[in-house]
Image (cartoon, rainbow, N blue to C red):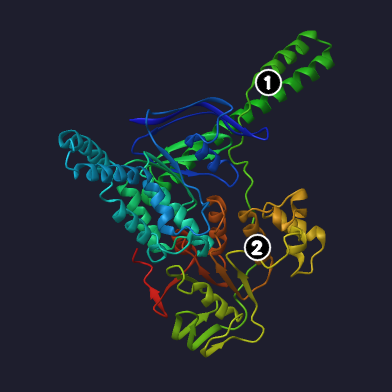
Amino acid sequence: MSIIQVNQVSYAVYEQPLFESVNLTIEATDRIGIVGQNGVGKSTFLKLIAGEEVPDSGERYKAHDATIHLHQQTVDFDAHETVREFLEACFADISELQAKMTALETKMSQPNADLEKLLEQYGQLQEKFYELGGYTCESRLQEVANGLGLGQYLDYPLATLSGGQRSKVALAKCLLEQADILLLDEPTNHLDRDTIEWLIQFIHQYEGAILIVSHDRYLLDQVATRIFEIDDQQIYQYPGNYTRFKQLKEERLLVAYRDFKNQQDKIDRLKSQIKQYRQWGNEGHNPKLFKKAKSLEKILAKIEPVSDPTNHRQMNITVEDAGKKGPKRLVEFRGVSKSFNAEILSDVNWLVRRGEHIGIVGRNGIGKSTLLKLVAGTIEPDSGQIVRPDQLAIGTMSQHPFSNLSGERRVIDVFRQPFSLTQEQARHALAQFLFFGEDVFKSLDELSGGERMRLKWAQLIQGQYDLLLLDEPTNHLDIDSKELIEEVLADYTGSMIIVSHDRYFTDTCCDKLYELTNGQLNLIDKSVK
């Protein structure tokens, strides 16, 4: 049964079209993944479905009484409101019914009560209370909170939580709403692998429809039954999960490119014929040949141009050969221990060799970023020794690049700072990462999260490093950008250590995978999925 229909919908932002004449249907049990490059309008599409944005033309129809809840990554809250109080707001209808039932119970206990009438009213309220899940709301709240790693924070004021924890709270509230349609916008942001697995199981068991904007290919492979790709102001619809979408998209692009090529060949032939007829007409002073040329020009003018499906801007990255020179042993931990509030490393012995691509996984807060800082030498161990060769060149990427710099700094100045480059050389290098024209003079404050990541990648690729330390390097990148960087790093001959929750990324780029748990680095057998 369809619960949403979109007919001939067009929508523009500041006169820039995002969607043109879009038609689609959403069924009651759909699991739809929404993909597309950054800036194509994925979040706006969710708002159109939710009814928070109104199309410029066309119609969006919703089934009668169907409820929709849009996941907001940020939450508005009272300064003293606890996580539990914030989440319990989802059960406002249930709380109201419970209050009415309690009032009836009080009335029924009175000597002169009309029990028959009151019991009938109570039964109606009780039936509604049951339908809304009143007897299970507390257990559901606890289940969702535990699943997202929030169980221990339920009685904490929201104001005391980190930004990532608040994002989890926002997701928890959305999941507890029990709407007929859930609209999730990057739900795996700030989730570790265990909580992603829990979310996957939740989505499988959910009774309504779910639309998910996500760059997490593993999630989309596990849950999506359809993929909507937003591209060139259209929404292309594909059956199946993300892997199936990639196959079908390639087939579509091959057909589209053949159509484009055939049209270009036809246009070239017409132009050649027009030129030839005009030349013959001039040589022979023959009006009929000019008339023939005019006729062909009219045919040419009526051709609706087919766009080149390969004409998409993407990063053009080339990496100089690295890793064949220099020491074979880059970093060695000898009995290293480190603690903050809890123990992160306990008597760890570990060796990083030249040319290795190492992935580090583990739950949030376990100390993965701290491990990278120990490798880089920006913090020291509590005990043990970390041995590095003299003049080891280390390139680092944090989860929030350039957060230590003034937001007024310009892109080109930030990029050039570590290198001896002319402005022309810098602009050429930045163009490979889609910073064109005046983009290079933008301030850091003007950049999106994805643009900051691209700028940091530009710096890392430009540098000559013995070892790259990458902390969640695919954050804020769209899938196309992720896959391009994967191709580059898979062939990279240098050494790198990657902290990432992105399974596709670590599977593609890493030849060794370690889990940080209980103060130890445990090697994972990558052949076991």
Residue, x 59% and y 86% (percent of image)?
388
Residue at 33% over, 38% down: 29
Q: Is residue 423 left or right of residue 524?
A: right
In-image side of 352 versus 303 (left or right): left
Measured as percent of width and height from the top left, residue 100 is found at 30, 42
* Residue 300 image label: 1
* Quadrant for the N terminus in the image: top left
User: In front here: 517 or 227?
Assistant: 517
Q: Tell me where residue 357 appears, x and y as whole percent.
A: 51, 71
Q: Is residue 67 toward the left or the right of residue 440 in the image? A: left
Could you tell me the amino acid type at mark 1?
Answer: Leu
Q: Nearer the viewer, residue 29 or 391?
A: 29
* Residue shown at 41% from the left, 63% from the top: 155
Secondary structure of the residue carrying tag 2 is helix
> Residue at 64% of width from left, 46% of height from top?
313
Number of residues whose C-alpha sits closer than 10 Å to that of mark 2, classed few (under 14), some (14–19) or many (20 or more): many
Quadrant where the image shows the C terminus: bottom left
Can see residue 343? Answer: yes
Could you tell me which secondary element the residue under label 1 belongs to? Answer: helix
Mark 1 nearby-residue class (10 Å; few <14, some 14–19, many ≥20): some
**As shown in the figure, which amino acid type bears the numbered disc 2?**
Lys
Q: Nearer the viewer, mark 1 or mark 2?
A: 2
Q: Is residue 220 visible?
A: no
Task: Judge whether 490 appears above or below 108 on screen.
Answer: below
Whether residue 89 is situated above or below residue 494 in the rendered picture = above
Asked if the residue under mark 2 is in contact with the one under mark 1, i.e. CB atoms within 8 Å, the reply is no
Seen from the viewer's position, the closer of residues 497 and 376 is 376
Query: What whole-number distance in Å separates the C-alpha atoms at marks 1 and 2?
Result: 47 Å
Point out the residue furthest to the front here: 112
Residue with the mark numbered 2? 456
Residue 449, image x, y percentages: 61, 55
- Estimate the x, y position of residue 439 in percent, counting from the top left: 74, 51
